[in-house]
Amino acid sequence: MGQGAAKLCGEVNTGVNMSPEAKAAMVTNGWDKGYVAFGFTASETSVKVATALPQVQENVKWVTVSFNDTALMDIPEDFDQNMMTPGSTQILGVKSELYSLITDGVACMPALAIDGQMYNGSEEIVKMLAVANKSPKEVMDLIELSLKNNDKLLLACKHFGWAGMHKYQNYAMVNKDHYVDYGNGNKDAAWEKDIADVIKAFFGKLEAVLAAKPKINGFFVGESQTLADASLINWVQSFEGVCGLDVKKHYPLCYANWDLVKASPPSGSLPFIYGFPVFCGYVTDANKDARLAGFDINKYWE
């Protein structure tokens, strides 16, 4: 599927401009052949690609990406196994010169190399794989739904959760400029309500899709994993753990579906299912006082 996927990538605008230096770096590190994925698969974005790839490609090499400027190295023996992509043997900092080079300065994760050509954007990569593998319309529709809403949904997570945590940690893991305009007191009620309306419409659609199924079985389409499940895998845990939204109360079918996913984790999902809640705990602690004082996403569901 390698060359076919590369040709289709233009349809979803996910290809990275590869300079001669970037191409040389891919060759030097043995990343110029086959599938090489880059990401921290305990994250809410990387997990999409981590669960999509096993469905369409057997042989994928993973490079774990850390939130610092670590130069490429073998993963230390004491690295938390709950946070590491199974099979990954190397780690590279998202702020490193090498990662910036091979992603044309974007330095975001996840990223996927196919025969040395880099692609980025978690939702875009999943869509690319779905197009290349001729996924059915009901799968494509759900991938498009997640892709269409992805930016605003992640803004909600940033505002109602991540911004407070990163401020508390003095922005040690991120670019401060990306977060200082979000969090408690930085957006007015009208902005928050607009974002809440996007969340309601998104989860409302997912509830309707699940309600139309004969039974909740852990899959959004049919009786087995599809790329739609990969695209949607993070949202319940993200909104519950990061934003503090009472997903179980407001979207019970989505919550029940997620319970079944956790009970039988798909390939590639374990770092997210078991590692991501650690970060959710940090988010909850950092935002505790603000939420008690009224900075609570749930008020827009009252």
Image: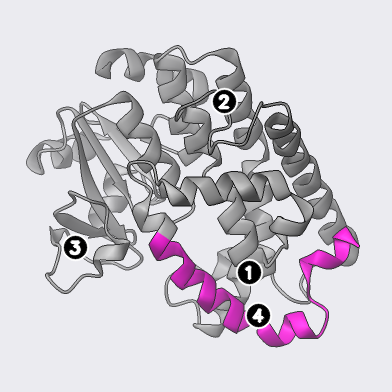
Q: Which residues are magenta?
A: 274-302
Q: Residues within 10 Å of mark 3 (few under 14, many from 20)?
A: some
Q: What SS does tag 2 mark?
A: loop
Picture residue at 22% right of the left edge, 49% below the top: 63
Name the residue tied to disc 4. Answer: 287
Please identify the quarter of the rendering in which residue 145 is found: top right
Q: Which mark is residue 71?
A: 3
**Alpha carbons under labels 2 and 1: distance apart:** 30 Å
What's the amino acid at mark 2?
A: Val
Q: Which colour assignment does the render follow?
A: one colour
Measured Cα–Cα span from mark 2 to mark 3: 41 Å
Q: Are marks 4 and 1 in contact (CB under 8 Å)?
A: yes
Q: Left or right of 208: which side holds 89?
A: left
Q: Amino acid at mark 3?
A: Ala
Q: Nearer the viewer, mark 2 or mark 4?
A: 2
Answer whether residue 144 is magenta in the image: no
Asked whether residue 108 appears in the rendered view, the answer is yes
Q: Earlier in the sequence, mark 3 or mark 4?
A: 3
Q: Quadrant of the N terminus?
A: top left
Residue contact at pointers 1 and 3, CB within 8 angstroms = no
- Considering the whole magenta stretch, tell me its main secondary structure: helix
In the rendering, which numbered label is found on residue 161? 1
Name the spot of residue 22 as percent of width and height, x first. 22, 39
Secondary structure at numbered mark 3: loop
Instruction: Tell me how far mark 2 sits from mark 4, CA to CA.
Output: 36 Å
Q: Residue at x 33, y 33 (%)?
A: 53
For the C terminus, which image quadrant?
A: bottom right
Asked if marks 3 and 4 touch (Cβ < 8 Å), the reply is no
Crowd around label 2: few <14 · some 14–19 · many ≥20 (10 Å): some
Amino acid residing under circle 1: Gly
